[in-house]
Image: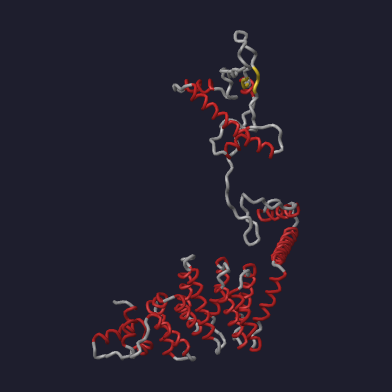
Amino acid sequence: MTTKPKSRATTSQPTGVYKADSVKDVAEILNITISDTVAGALASDVEYRIHQVIEEAARFMRHGRRTTMNTSDIDQALRVLNIEPLYGHSSHNPPVFRRALPFPNMPAAGPVYFVEDEEIDFDRVLREDKVTLPKPVSWTAHWLAVEGVQPLVPENPPAIPRESDLAKNGILQQAVNGTGAGDIPANATTSVIAAAAKKQQEQQQQQQQLVKHVLSRELQLYYTRLTSSLLPPSSTDFAKRTAALASLRSDAGLQALLPYLIRWVGEGVVGALKEGLQSENDGKVLEVYLDVISALLENTTLFVEPYLHQILPPILSTLLHSNLPPTHATHLRTSSAQTLSRLLTQHSTTYPSLSPRIMKTLLLALIAPGKSKGTREGAIRGLVGVGKEAVIKGLIEGGGAKLVGNECLAGGEDANALVNSVMDALQVVHVPSDMADSLDMSNPVDAGVADKLKEVLGDYFAQKLSGDATWARAIAEAGGSD
């Protein structure tokens, strides 16, 4: 007995949630004709993509400890799958869908959902106050504090004055303007001014104490050990002084101590120069101070530009002082000129007016009448530190060498150091030749060179340069032609 196999059902089952008819509808909108097979394949692929997106979004939902999926989960899933995100949907303002009533003419149609639009009453909107939009967010920079002091800029909060300060300021203003004089006693203004001056002095002392407290205990101890190692100078503490200067040249982290060290040097130089004639010990002290300034300038980790106006006075005071110790005078002025040259080399690019201002000060000290030989020597060595052009302008074009030569011819105190400084400065203009030949006065050219030297340098230094013809010609050429 044979049995016939059962025939399979030929009716097509639905492929999934996304129907092929939906694909055909989209194709018709785009004026594209596709077959049923292609529509079914595209519907299967769309359904697969939807499942993939939903699975990724479900992961974000579970990581967010939520049981409801929102649009942000879909956006994150699309970003992970490298798919263009959906625009116009936000989880912060989710749309509200409402179900429409069934159509009586089409009972077979499924449920329809729509987004309910909000009804706006124009009369109510016009009556309400207009909301001004705030300015967009922007960024700007300002100084919160400069050297520990809060600047008075609009971005910083203003200092709140106390009532006592307001009362005193009001009385002072009335006293200055002359208003309300009948209401203020005669001795009230004096007492208030004295009280205000005392209070201002107390505030300055308090600020100085506060600034000192900013330094750490280690920096305060370092400052004490450093200054005690440098001064007073003695032959037994040479190793300590050398180590202290080496620390200033190379150690990082000394920026907080920089203003205190510069102030210490300035006060020390003033104290050493304030008396008439300096002793040998004062000369040694000044050498230490110049070494400290030079070490600070050599330290590449320090930012010294804000303190240049405090570094220059000790250097120029030592350079141009008239009564330095005789055994240390030349060395002190040479060291000051070298330190000045280093300072200008490092910072003249940042401050172009620095070199002309210093050169003007040195020229005034050199050419002005009534200056001592020590001051003129310091000015000449300072011009050497500024550079070749400064020497030409001061000694040759400005007549400084001629003025010094006339003083040397007039006699007086020993002027060897001053003469040596002029000769050293002229060597900056042109180096003397090794095989020196004197000027030949029978030669008209050499005679003209000699006359030019007497005109720009005077008889004294013209005679000293006449023994080197090459050097004399270079100096005369630097002085210009008639």
Residue at image coords 55%, 28%: 44
Up the image or down, 78 lies above or below 171; here it is: above
Up the image or down, 442 lies above or below 320; here it is: below
Q: Residue furthest top?
A: 105
Up the image or down, 217 lies above or below 374; here it is: above
Q: Is residue 296 visible?
A: yes
Q: Give the image location of residue 336, x and y in percent.
A: 53, 79
Up the image or down, 356 lies above or below 132; here it is: below
Q: Quadrant of the C terminus?
A: bottom left
For residue 40, side relative to residue 56 (left or right)? left
Q: Give the image location of residue 342, x and y in percent.
A: 50, 74
Foreground pick, 129 / 1: 1
Q: Give the image location of residue 152, x and y in percent.
A: 63, 54
Coloring applied to the structure? secondary structure
Q: Residue furthest front?
A: 1
Q: Quadrant of the N terminus?
A: top right
Foreground pick, 105 / 7: 7
State the count of labels: 0
For residue 268, side relative to residue 195 (left or right)? left
Asked which quadrant contains residue 57, the reply is top right
Residue at image coords 57%, 79%: 291
Asked which quadrant contains residue 450, the reply is bottom left
Q: Is residue 120 visible?
A: no
Q: Give the image location of residue 122, x and y in percent.
A: 61, 20
